[in-house]
Amino acid sequence: MKFQIPIGPQHPALKEPISLRMTVEGEVITDADIRLGYNHRGVEKVAEGKNYIQNIYLTERICGICSHSHSTCFVQGVEKLMELEPPKRGMYIRYLVSELERIHSHLLWLGVAGHEAGFDSFFMYVWRDREIVMDLLEMITGNRVHYAINTVGGVRRDLDEAQKAKILEGVATLRKRSEYYLDLGANEPSFVARIAGVGLLSLEQVISLCAVGPTARASGWDRDVRKEDPYAVYDELDFEVATADTCDVLGRVVVRIKEVLEAYKMIEQMMKNLPDGDIACKAPRKAKPGEVVSRYEAPRGENIHYIKANGTDKPERLKVRAPTLGNYPATVEMLKNGFIADIPLIFAAIDPCICCAERAVTLVSARTGEESVVSTAELRKLALARTKNAPVKRNAVWPL
Amino acid sequence: MTDAELIDKLKADLGDRVEIANPARRRLFLKVAPGDLVAVTTRLRDAYGVVLLSTISGVDLGTAFEIIYHFSTPEHDFNLRTEIPRDDPRVATITTVIPGAILYEREVQDMFGIVVDGIPDGRRLLLSDDWPEGQHPLRKDWTHDRPKEVIPGGQS
């Protein structure tokens, strides 16, 4: 007999609203469905009514983890539309923040992956080290999450020598520890046994479902926007695209740690070659009619903005595609034929808790389909009675 | 292959079915008629290795809708655009060629009210289930009136 397990949209373990419907047969997932839109804020529509400077701060608020990637993607598109040549020093600082953000995002993911695999000391070690990079970001930009360092034509804050020294010091510490995590993540027998072979996604599926980012690279698809379409400073940096060919969660862990190691390399190069000069150039308020496709490698994969200008100070159209949307069709495939216990691992980045999700309200016998504990209707009656007596705000006087 | 070489090759291959613009390095904009969309996409996939669809953008031009399919290969970006009339907004699905296009096509259906013919899963993606029919937020003539905020118990 088939069961459908709904997870979300409102769920204690989900940080964000998304609805997953798993059709399971015993322990095995036979089908998965993802429903979106619970957090749709209409950013694209709002952007049409705001000017370019306001839109930098709007796009920054699309995501709370990779906030810099959206604002950078938008800003580099607008700079193309306005035909600006931003000064090199500003570009180095902007993409320095990009790489630091990649480190913090990947370390966050690694910690969550460790936690979901039941390896909580890994989670705590990684998140302790993530604080180093968060402190660096705060020192450079003044903020821990929404850095607000981008502006059209450059960046808003400069670096001094003391800050450079601190960045290099932090990166040196992080590198030593990340190398240890790579060793641990790829070799620790119990951790590897938990994550190897889970969430399989073949290269053919990656190609046909248009998966992006570390998810795709863990299946041997070596596409990285920084390499193939090097924007701003990336053609001056020496780095490699991290890939793995295991096609599973183990590969995704390895790819992310390798990417973090590459990011340290890039940061050291940027610090060594940081040019002198201005950090921003003056930008016009309006952009000439035209269109631009701006691509950016965010921590989760390719981020693409399509901006169309109509000659005023507001964009005619701003289309945003965040990498996670591109990975949903692939996620469905990864979940299929997996076990219920693997859902959190496969979905680690979204981080649902399956123990809570499995709280079945009705126990149905798998053989006969008979409801045994409490019927849905009865449960509903109980729930309604409970809601009526609950201390809700219905007639309360609002304290403000 | 440089951009110019690729454009020559595409012109020889696809003939007058496409209009090619190349506003920046790597960026190719190919304009096709809606009827040729699936055929051109198939040809691009099979002969040029164009398999990665990044997204589908819809643009409201006033009298028509423009749909742009953003593809990329390691060497080039292919932006395939087509225009469909506003009073009969229909376009064929490309999920038969690129299965990963499904979510983007559903998004275009929601946001612009464009009907994607032959879409395997045409449910709403972003709009809620109780969203009124015929309301498509990204059309230019659609405006949002924020409903008045009601505070339970009233303001004291």
Image (spheres, rainbow, N blue to C red):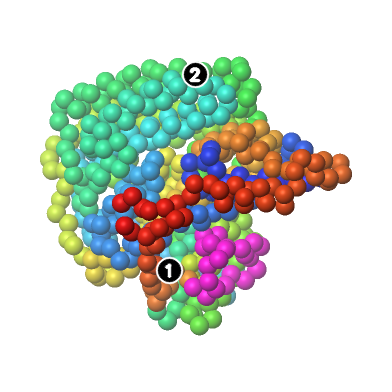
Where is residue B12 drawn, in percent x and y? 50, 67
**Circle 2 residues within 10 Å: few <14, some 14–19, many ≥20:** few
Residue A225 appears in the picture as rendered: yes
Residue A91 x/y as whole percent: 24, 43
Q: Is residue A296 visible?
A: no
Question: Which amino acid does the dot numbered 1 rest on?
Answer: Leu
Nearer the observer, A23 or A305? A23
The residue tagged with tag 2: helix, strand or loop? helix
Q: Is residue B143 above or below residue A150?
A: below
Q: Mark 2 points at which residue?
A: A121
Q: Is the magenta stretch mostly helix, strand or loop?
A: loop
Residue at image mark 1: B138
Chain containing the residue with disc 1: B
Residue at horizontal 39%, vertical 62%?
B150
In this view, the residue in front, A265 or B14, is A265
Q: Which chain letter goes with mark 2?
A: A
Question: For the magenta stretch, what is the residue range?
Answer: B115-135
